[in-house]
Amino acid sequence: MEDSRADSNVADAGLVSRLRHGDQRALEEFYRQHGPVVRAYVRRFVRRDDAEDVVQQVFFELWRSRHRIDPERSIVGFTLGIARKRSIDYLRRRKDLIIDVNDLRELAGDDGDDLIDRLTWASAVRSGLDDLGVDQREALELAYFGDLTQKEIADRLGVPIGTVKARMARGMRRLAEKIEKGELI
Amino acid sequence: MSAHCDAELFALLAGELGREETLAVVAHLRECGACTSELVSVAVAYGSLRAARRVEDYLDVRGDVAIAEAVPLVGRDQQPPLQFRTRHRQRVLSLVAAAVVVVAAATGVSLALSLSRHPSPPVSAVAALHHMDAPVAATGEATVRTVGLTRQMEVVTKGLPTAPVNHYYEVWLLQPTTNKMLPVGVLSPAGESTYALASSIMAQYSAVDISLQTNDGTTAHSLVSVLRGSVHTV
């Protein structure tokens, strides 16, 4: 069954366009959709009590710099880049905090770029998964995120294992197409 | 194996095939260009989904987001802090500020992210909650939305009597086949609450349960379920 929902990348492109044109509702939507990722990232480096202030700074800066958003690149990655800078600023100000050297490496330098790349890609893959038909998405989520085998998925859903295999094969084929065509950014 | 083996490729990569099945699939792949090509596609999807899973696990165990928080754009004055429990320990988390309000000092422009609930993130699953040890008229619904890498579960109940003194209602995730249960959080006195869960955790449960708990410090399920329902993907 093919999903009737709009392709997430098309939706994201619309969101970016609206954001670039100053639509505050678009910023709210983006915050609602991707705020958890930004918050999780910031909290890795910023004290819990201060994290929300930093997240707000990030989204404010995203708004202020909306004209610099490249529609051809991931807006999640762009926002995480801002979050990285603001987290570094925070740590510079809070000289009283002791930072684990591994965390510092993860924030600054090449490791920091790598972490943002991985977060951005995970978000894009998730979007691709969410765009699949319900049956395909359900089977793949149970396999990858629920740690179930195909037999266990069949038992859970009450369908033959052949059906599960077929749904997963179709879902993975579709997801691979999206990835290879560069539809997921 | 003469027929194409595309349906077996995930099981091959995931290590779910036995020796004979593995050898049969491999022998077919050696001879079949179509299935070899399909294997490339499956490997691309498999690796990408594994990468996404690894990041979610990473967020789960690091950075104090064992159960990642969602985007509760609720008024600070409208709701008390919700209680979240991680897999490892309970923790009370403060909710996000009432709204993200930032002021551009240079321009004097005020930008506020409103508290509007529309448009909501896409609904990925729902559960109709039916009465168990509760009045017949009591009902509820759990709505699961995809919010970035997390799942946001909104529980709305109707007709539940006010919890007796020193009692409260608690929301759980349940896997009926194993009776595995995860406490999600306290249901607000208004009968409506929203919780955030890592999608990897949400995927391990197929039902939602609401219990009546005694406020005696016990964290286990009281065995008094008032509402329960199966989660259905939509």
Image (cartoon, coloured by chain):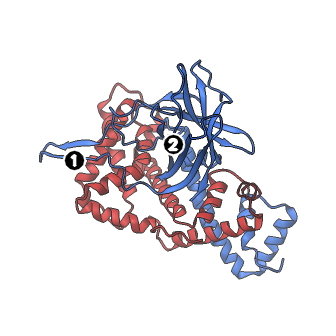
What's the residue type where badge 2 is placed? Val
* Cα separation between marks 2 and 1: 30 Å
Q: Residue at x 14, y 42 (%)?
A: B105
Residue B197, numbered circle: none
Q: Which mark is residue B111?
A: 1
Q: Is residue B17 above or below residue B30?
A: above
The residue at which mark 2 appears reads as B155
* Chain coloured red: A
Task: Left or right? Give the position of A72 relative to B218.
Answer: left
Q: Where is residue A25, by image quadrant?
A: bottom left
**Chain given the colour blue:** B
Judged from the image, the secondary structure of the residue bearing numbered disc 2 is strand
Q: Is residue A6 left or right of residue A89?
A: right
Upstream in sequence: badge 2 or badge 1? 1
Instruction: State the residue in front, A97 or A120.
Output: A120
Decide which of B135, A130 is in the foreground and name it.
B135
Q: Dot 1: what SS?
A: strand
Horizontal and vertical percent position of residue B139:
56, 43
Q: Is residue A28 above or below residue B168?
A: below
